[in-house]
Each structure stands twice: as structure tokens, then as C-alpha cells.
Image: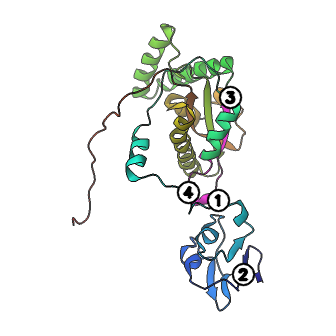
Amino acid sequence: RIYQMLFTVNTEVCTRCGLCVADCPTGLLVMSDNGPVTGKGGCISCGHCVSICPTLALDSDMTPRNEQIDVTKEPKLTAEQAELFLRSRRSIRNYQNKPVPVELIRKVLNVARMAPTATNTQGISYIVIRDKKRLHRIADLVLEWMHIAAKTVPIMRLYARAAQAEVDKGKEYILRDAPALVVAIGSKKDIHRTHDSGHSCLAYAELYAPTVGLGTCWAGFFEHAGEAEYQPLLDELGVPDDKIVAGGILMGYPKVRYRNIVERQPLDVTFDTEE
């Protein structure tokens, strides 16, 4: 065996096929007479090299094989099943007055953490608000920010008026009376990557939630207020000074059930060449 700082190679079973080297996204691995070794580059802990090895010769301190799940024996969704699953997702705006258990939310977010993130930074964490009084305060703060933003952003003037009209009717328009608000937060050092990564993770949460009986909806107005770094809102959420809001979704048990898949606008795609 060849032992290195990050990798262990079992040279007795390594065939030097080169798959790990070819699939390394940073060019860290290079092939030697004894198998893969580290060259120039850095490890982003993607685990591709360990996962792709056909003879199980390679292991890594960063992504140990014993923590990886062998999916080769698991049944796969058919293309038709996958399409139906993805197209069946709906944005839920009507929720049962029923709290969502912490462990169920944790289960959803445990899947969300597997989403792709920029350079595999995996830097997204979450704040989950379940207390009704705090949810109402957050909704009030978002509406407050909307009225402030409306003074300089014309389109927000329309949104603020519409939201206020619904609130005046006694409706909780901002957070839809959802029993939980899931807020993704990440590093302030790279705002654009943090937003992209946060949305990626929350998209995974949205897709997985229906499998455990939950519904979700993007909290758009909340997200805008968070991205604008409205300080009273950040204080209420308890966002650390070095973090920013990277996205937010509502979560709860749906009050309604949809019978049909609603059609979307036709596909619009341009290819450079047609076969």
C-alpha cells in the first residue's frame, strides 16, 4: 500500500485504469507506475475518485469509502417515473394548522445538504422558525421592508400595496400561515456563490419534501428582504454577522391535494446544430 496525506491506494488491486485521474475535477491526481498519486492542485472533497474506482483500490481521508453508500445494487427510477415525480411538485400555499416535527424537517434538510454547491464548498446551514409568534413577527418585518423598498423601487410599490390589502383582510399573505420557515444561510465572503448554493440546496428540499408528506413554497418576499439585509429581519432571525440569507422556503402539511399535473409553457431551446 502507498500511504499519502489524503489518499490510500491498495496497489495489489489497483489496475491503473486511470478513471480516478480522469475524473478528478482539480487535476490533483496523476498516475504513476504504482497507481494514482497526488500532484499539483487541491482536493475539494468531492469523493469522485473513491466512488469511481472499479476495484475499490482507492480510499481517502477526506471522503472515506466506509461513509459512502454503494448505489450499484439499488433499484433506479425509470425515466417515466422520474419525470412524473419531478413534474408533480407543486408550490403549496395552503397548510394545515399542524406543527411539523423537528426530526421530519431534519430528515428533509439532511437530503438538501447533498445538493451541488459551488466548488463543493457545502457552506450552507439552516435556521428553522416554527414558533407562530416569531413567524408573525417575521411576516410583519418583511411587509415593513416592502413598504420601505417601495419608495425607490416602482414594482415593489405594487407588491407592497397588494400584500397590505390582503393583510388588511386578515390574511397572512407573506408566509401563508405556514407552520415552518426554512432559511438557508451562508458565507458573506462570496455572495453570488452563496445564493446559488443556497437555492440548489433548497431545491433539493422542495423535491424531497413531498415524499415524507410535506409541501413547500419559495418565500419570495422574505428572500428579497433577507438579501437586502434588512437589519431588523436579520436580528429577528439571528443571522450571524458573517452570514447572509441565501434563500427561504415555507414548509408544512398541505391542506389540499392536486389531482393533475399542470402544464407549463412550451420548451424553448436552441441547438447550434440539428441532427
Q: Earlier in the sequence, mark 1 or mark 4?
A: 1
- For image coordinates 49% across by 8% down, the residue present is 168
Disc 2, disc 1: CB below 8 Å?
no
- Residue 56 appears at what percent x and percent y? 65, 74
Q: CA distance from mark 3 to mark 1?
A: 27 Å
Q: Is 124 a magenta residue?
A: yes
Nearest the viewer among 168 and 218 is: 218
Kind of residue indicated by mark 4: Glu
Circle 1/circle 4 CB separation < 8 Å: no
| Residue on which the image places disc 2 | 10
- Of the numbered discs in the image, which one, if any, rests on residue 168? none
Q: Mark 3 and mark 2: span between their CA atoms?
A: 45 Å
Q: Between 222 and 60, which is closer to the camera in this rendering?
A: 60
User: Which picture quadrant has residue 266?
Assistant: top left
Q: Is residue 244 left or right of residue 159?
A: right
Label 4 environment density (alpha carbons within 10 Å; few <14, some 14–19, many ≥20): few
Mark 1 Cα shell of 10 Å, populated few (<14), some (14-19), many (≥20): few
Question: Are discs 3 and 2 less than 8 Å apart at CB?
Answer: no
Q: Amino acid at mark 1?
A: Ile
Label 3, on which residue?
101
The magenta segment? 112-129
Give the residue furthest to the top.
169
Residue 8 shown in magenta: no
Dot placed on the residue nearer the N-terminal end, 3 or 1: 1
Residue at screen point 63% across, 48% down? 113
Quadrant where the N terminus is found in the figure? bottom right
Q: CA distance from mark 1 to mark 4?
A: 10 Å
* Quadrant the C terminus occupies: bottom left
